[in-house]
Amino acid sequence: MVFNNGNGRLGGNYSTVEIIDPPINGYNYSGSLPYLPSNTSWMYNYGNPNGLYAQNISGAQQLSNGNVLLCDGPGGKFIEVNSAGNTIWQYINPVSNADIMSQGTTPTQNIVFRCNFYPSNFSGFDNTALTTSTIIENSNTNANVCVLSAPLPIELLDFDCLKHDKQVDLVWSTTAEVNGSHFEIERSKNGYDFEKIGVVFCNRNSNSKIDYDFSDYEPLQQTSYYRLKQVDYDGKYEYSKIVNVTYGKIDNFKAFFNSQAGKIVIDNSGLNKQDCDVHLYDVMGRLVKATSFLAGVANTFIDTQTLYDGTYFLIIREADKNTSFKLNINN
């Protein structure tokens, strides 16, 4: 079992818990890759590829009943899920790295390294009475059903960032809104420490798709990380996934897919004077094409006619920096 924190993962930062069932008896390694298996036997990601993101520490433990106990370290959340990925119960550590939190506060940087499950017959409990006590969270009206907080009544469909000329455009959509107040747009230079850079107001109540956008006209040099803080009229809030874009002086290149030619075109607009490695990855993070970009060459082409249609990530690796592009290929 692996808790993949997912920081810097292609397609956005999100965490997954993955169980691998490798062959252990009577299997001779042939020297080809992968060793086996080629797929995980179980994966958990909250039912949403970007719904769980714990950028450091954290962990998971499989229980004797087949369920999995997750620890979201930065969020201080302990969650038991069944084999279908459904939440059985969750608990939030009420102490952050600063102090004891008030009831209902969304935790950040609780820095819980790990939680472990011990059955009632654990030897450490010998001669100890295990009796249920009173509710330990003050005024927790949901304690009887083990749900500490309900999700906000805003259903976020997607969230992405696009680089255009001298600005970064953030786009997102909702499929339903009830009592929604506004979105706070937050930006970070390291993916951990965020500051508010703008506000976009919600439609408040809606049961149809609504598209939103916000432009950052002064993006950070190198990499900017963005997230949305969804706030309702009751003051409750939650965060979206984190997206990032590389922008500014380090970007000497432009890249686009030419459907008529069936090629990716890399335009060296800045006439970069370094030789570069160019790698193309699919959405699973697998390297599908590799080439090089020679210093001073105006254009480089990557043939895509042998590739499946879909989303790919192009990484241009210079000596001291990388530039990435998200491309949709449709041959």
Image: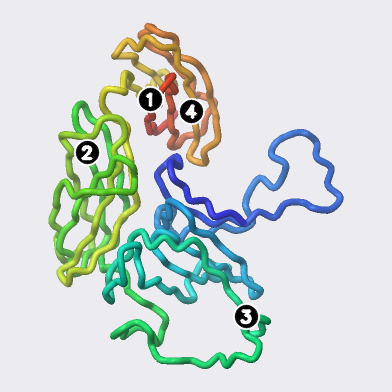
Instruction: Look at label 2 and name its amino acid.
Output: Asp
Q: Residue at x 47, y 21 (%)?
A: 278
**Residue 169 image label:** 2
Mark 4 sits on what residue? Answer: 280
Name the spot of residue 178 as percent of width and height, x first.
20, 69
Name the spot of residue 311 as percent of width and height, x first.
43, 37
Q: Mark 4, residues whose alpha carbon is within 10 Å: few (<14), some, or many (≥20)?
A: many
**Residue 257 image label:** 1
Which is in the foreground here, disc 3 or disc 1?
A: 3
Q: Residue at x 47, y 72 (%)?
A: 87
Calculate the distance from the C-alpha at mark 2 to the C-alpha at mark 4. 24 Å
**Residue 119 image label:** 3
Element under disc 3: loop
Instruction: Look at label 4 and name its amino acid.
Output: Leu
Name the spot of residue 225 as percent of width and height, x first.
30, 42
Q: Mark 3, residues whose alpha carbon is within 10 Å: few (<14), some, or many (≥20)?
A: few
| Mark nearer the N terminus (3 vs 1) | 3
- Asked whether the residues under the numbered discs 2 and 4 touch, taking CB atoms below 8 Å apart as contact, a structural biologist would say no
Which is in the foreground here, disc 1 or disc 2?
A: 2
In this picture, residue 148 sits left or right of residue 280: left
